[in-house]
Image (cartoon, helix red, strand yellow):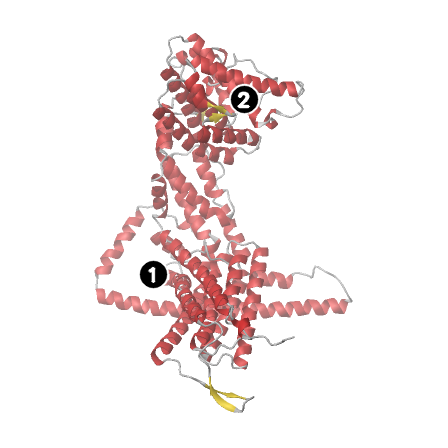
Amino acid sequence: MNTYMDASRFSAPLPFIGTYVAATSLVCSIAMAADVYHGCRNKKRWFPCKFFALNAATLTLLAIAMKLPVDLSDNMPTAWDQLAKLSGNAFMCTAIGNFMPSIGPMDNKEIFMNIAALGILVITVVVNVCIQLGTAAISDFLIAHVIAMLFMLFLLLILSFTALTVPITKKYLDKIASDEEPKEVGRLTVEELKQDIIKYWMMAETGSPQFVIARSMTSAASGGICFLTALILAITWIKLLLFGYPNRLYFDYNEQMIEFVSDQSDYKWSSALIVVIQSLGVGIGTISPVCRWLYAVKFKCSGSEGGSNSHVDKFKVENYWIEKLVEWKERPLTFQFGSKNCRKCIHLTKRRLLEFCIRIQIVIVVVSKSVHLFTVFLARKFLSCCRYCEGCKKKSKANDPEAKRGSKLDLRRYVLHLEGEEELPLQMMKNNSDATDSLIQMGKKKQPKYFTELLKNFTGINGIAAFDSDHVPALFSEEPPNCWALPVVTLTTIAIALPNIENHMVHQLLSGVREGLNYVALVEKHLDKERNLVSIRNAAGILWLEVDIFCRWLDQDLQKISLEGKSSKENLERLSDMAKNIVSEFKTNTSGNLKEKPIDWPVKVIAANSMYRISKTILLELESSSDQTVEDLFAQLSAMIADILGACLTNLPRVISMKCFCSAIEKREENVNQAARLLGETEEILEMLQQHELSGLSPDQAAYLHEWRALVKRRNPSKFVSTPNNDIASTDSVELSITIE
């Protein structure tokens, strides 16, 4: 048997493996570029991590991208191969620098797992590079490789020790924010909401865990290291392009002769592809860390009011840097074993180890502050030269912002900052005073025009009383309660089923209800504290999906009903009979003995019961009003829908205020941004609703439709015991005012 095997067959796939490495590097580069774009688009020059963050996915991609730096088995003598190893190390340094803010939102377990995984990867890369340096597998750009390797280790050290401050700073800033939490949220005007959003946005922005890390001294230092890493790679590129890559000699010990190194490696053309993509990735990825570095410098340069002028204080290591390590040092061991001397030895070893870690943390912070202050010194000298060259022009311009700021809300007390960040409040006032305005304007571009048009039919609370009459006999002794959405969906279903209604009127109603139900869902989600209406809301959601998309109600074609019916009364009776049959069938199947509560009924039965009651109520009115046209009935149904939706949306200011604060610190910034956009979307609607004074309900009561109906019933019982026609006739003589107190 021929045991000879062609060695070239084993290396044949390597160019394709190199292409795979280049592809993963490209994905990482695109993610870093996406973070840069996201930061610029949202005017966040500290570039939060949204796409390229420290997690399992990015670590897996990085592990693949490090294939060439850790490759010990292949002969890689060419310029592209040697440069690919260096670009891989630089790429890893850049990635670690980009990871800095992403540890902010993590909990303790996530931080530990991700830092441990990153540490294993970095140590693996460093060990493999050291082996290659020792065996001369890496024989070019030696100094650059050593520096990049040291930078990689130092960046890992910075990231690891910065992570120790995350739980401490979160707890501290969350406590400060809690002191500003409103005790009671009543009905707020649009202007009051704007003021609240501005305050809470400032608190959420400055208390954002990512921003806290991004503006820290260690983040600034990592930005400087990333810049130096990119500079080293750029210099290596320039040297290679200007001076070329000469053939090198090496001594073959087996043949006892000197030979030229081959110009071909097993990776072939893929080495060049990897170098180009990873070098571009280093260039793109350096933007975020460097901008965070400059962002921190800007705070120190552009204003020192409130800051300390003492040189000793500038190098002071604040407590939050070492608090976690000190806590671990003083904490007793959680396990007990061995003799007293053994436990004593373990405890002392632990204390010595943590004392060493505390010293390392102090060194890291002091070095970071030194780099930062040196950069600030250079930046101030540069700015002084610029001001000197420009003369007095800057002075006249510099006074304008101060004058403008004087007329604006003073938000400095709402800026959450740590010890040593005394300059932050003033700088946040200068640079972010109009941020919420832009968010509100973004919301205004998405105003619900159909819903706004529908709410022009809003009359107050007439529809709340008129859609369900006590004259309609109940099919069960106990019936399911109403959420806000269910009667709206049922009334819309009836309106669609009416005969001879123009298509554009149906389209406008559907579009208005579709937009309105989005806000109803927000109100019900945030204010249904007891969670008793979840099943009713789910039923309304399923029912609306069928009505909106398929124009069907419980598998019945509404368009067919509309076309076949000769009158409104006939179609209403048809819907009522179908609904009654569904409920009766359910009652028969259960033999009248219902063990489950009405809120646990099947969706079909809940929807049918609502249709039965509402259609019967409208039929009662039609019987007492013989001259009412189909168009009049459609307009009346639209008014009922508008009244229910309008009453529901009186809760929206409270929802907006709750979104600003009632959330975890990690999600608060996103929620405040959503609240600002929501206010922009609904500002016109809220101003419209504010024209109707509504009193007599507490904020908690106003969240539920049955509370509104109970209040109307207490104040004007005739609205429930008389026919709906009489209700409408009496609205001119009886004025009911309800305000959320």
In the displayed structure, 472 sits above or below 95; it is above
Look at the image and tell me in which quarter the N terminus lies.
Answer: bottom right
Outermost residue on the front side: it is 1
Q: Nearer the viewer, residue 521 or 353?
A: 521
Residue at 70% in and 59% down: 334
Image coords of residue 686 (percent x, y): 38, 32
What is the x, y in percent for residue 243?
35, 81
Frontmost of labels 2 and 1 is 2
SS type, badge 1: helix
Residue farthest to the bottom?
256
Pointer 1 local density, CA inside 10 Å: few below 14, some 14–19, many at least 20 = some
Q: Which residue is mark 2?
A: 608
Q: Determine which of the numbered discs, if any, sits on residue 302 in the image.
A: 1
Count of residue discs: 2
Left or right placement of residue 230 versus residue 321 in this view: left
Closest to the observer, 190 or 7? 7
* Percent position of residue 408, x then y: 32, 46
Looking at the image, is mark 2 or mark 1 earlier in the sequence? 1
Going by the numbered disc 1, the residue's amino acid type is Ser
Does any portion of residue 640 appear in the rendered image? no
Distance from disc 2 to disc 1, alpha carbons, whole Å, reads 67 Å
Q: Residue at x 47, y 41 (%)?
A: 659
Label disc, if present, on residue 258 of the rendered structure: none
